[in-house]
Image: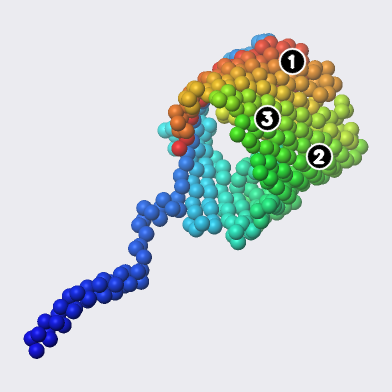
Amino acid sequence: MKKLIVVIVAFMVVFGSPLLSAQENTAAENAAPEKESARDVFERIVNFNAVIQSVFYYRNDSDFDGTRPFYNEDGQSVGLLGTFFAPKLELKPIEEIRIYYEAEIGLNLWSRNDPAQYSSGEKSAFQLAHREIYAEGHFVDNLVGFKVGYQKFYDPSGLFLGHWIGAASFISDPGWARFTLSAGQLPDQTYEGVTLDSNNFKHDTLVYGLRTDVPHKEWLFTIWMYGLNDSQIVDQTANIVTPGFSFSADYKWVNFGLDLALQAGKTTNAAADGDEKTFAYALQAFADFSYYGFGTHLSQLILSADDKHDHNGNNGAFYYSGKSRSRTIMLSEDEIRDKGGNLDEMIAARRGQFYLARSGYSLTDLAFSYNVKDIFVPALIVGAGFALESDNALAGVMVGVETDLDMEIKYKDILSFHLIGGILFPGGAAAAYVNQYDRKATNNQYMVETSLGVFF
């Protein structure tokens, strides 16, 4: 009997342990997965980025006329020191859904905005803008998607639509092409009512459009059509349709492309004897070359001109967003920090959220740069702007020739410091639109700009 018990115990010791281990492993495999920690959940769902930038800017004059006004206590120069902070928050509760929020505190001027000021009604209080608030989703292998909310909305060229607006888009991407159907509203100063139940769509500015993006290897082809219905001015509703074609190619050493946009439409009661018809165009071409640290940028912008008779029933000026690919700082928007005062907008008439350059505008710019180990990037920028219809610019043809030297110092992808010096040789076309007294004066204008930006 004792021998039998010894044999049974030995059998269990030799063969039981592996069996128990197998049972334990099976139990462990069938057990519930370990609970995700709060930190892991946060890192999976939340993504935070921000930009903080401080800018110094000085320009010797606000126009090209040295005539001193009789009363000139504020002087004629332009200068500012300012700081802004732009936090960007992205939430992804699930893989298919994305929620995005971006604000901007600034551009707060050191001489105007008081950080100790609590009252938001005071002019000296810090400025706060809520830029983008939208939800985005993609389902069924990207066959069904949407993007709805406040956003920076561009057409493929950016020449017609490049605004902060509320918009909704339906997106479908089967792989061989991407289709986007959009509708949105531009903000305006016409309010039908203060409360929600008294608001309507009677005098709003609406945009809509459809774009088709077709990729092919390094190329991207886009066919698009966007429209504008602007009824903010009573009895002067503008209906403008803008079809366009864009293509771009991105290779290791060169990136180039072309944007062509046409405009046609009608504005009721905008002419002296009835309606105003619009037939206009815009063209933009660009090329960026990169070779062993050397970089070259070339771009050309053309905006069509109106004839010399305003409100005669025909408008040939393009409804322009103010956005282009030009690297110039005074002849076009300063991409380092938009401060206004760029000539492509100053020579144009304002129509709601758009600019109509009745003299037309041709802007050619060329930039050379050299990247020294991603630390020091000096760049030389040269641009020349011309009016296409001199009769609308007091017989002036040249808008101006600009030359800038941009000395950029970088640290990884986090810090960027720019020191820029520039000079503008204005022409008669710019003087006709900008000068306050002598419309023929073309004094040179120079500027200095610095920018310290931290990106994370």
Please tell me which residue is depicted at 82% across the width and 35% down the height of the picture. 280
Q: Disc 1 on helix, strand or loop?
A: loop
Please tell me which residue is depicted at 50% across the width and 38% down the height of the picture. 86
- Counting residues from the start of the chain, the first of labels 2 and 1 encountered is 2
Q: Disc 3 on helix, strand or loop?
A: strand
Please tell me which residue is depicted at 83% across the width and 42% down the height of the picture. 265
User: Which mark is in front, 2 or 3?
Assistant: 3
Looking at the image, residue 72 lies above or below residue 304:
above
Q: Quadrant of residue 60?
A: top right
Residue 187 visible in the shown view: no
Q: Position of residue 164 (x, y in %)?
A: 63, 42
**Residue located beneath label 1 in the image:** 427
- Counting residues from the start of the chain, the first of labels 3 and 1 encountered is 3
Kindly identify which numbered label has been placed on residue 418.
Answer: none
List the single residue furthest toward the left. Answer: 2
The reply to whether the C-beta atoms of the residues labelled 2 and 3 are less than 8 Å apart is no
**Residue located beneath label 2 in the image:** 263
**Residue located beneath label 3 in the image:** 287
The reply to whether the C-beta atoms of the residues labelled 3 and 1 are less than 8 Å apart is no
Cα–Cα gap, marks 2 and 1: 29 Å
Badge 2: residue crowd in 10 Å (few <14, some 14–19, many ≥20): many
Looking at the image, residue 259 lies above or below residue 195:
above
Amino acid type indicated by mark 3: Ala
List the single residue furthest toward the bottom. Answer: 1
Q: Quadrant of residue 284?
A: top right
Quarter placement of the N terminus: bottom left
- Counting residues from the start of the chain, the first of labels 2 and 3 encountered is 2
Amino acid type indicated by mark 1: Gly
Cα–Cα gap, marks 3 and 1: 27 Å
Q: Position of residue 372 (x, y in %)?
A: 50, 22
Looking at the image, residue 295 lies above or below residue 216:
above
Of 250 and 118, the residue lying toward us: 250
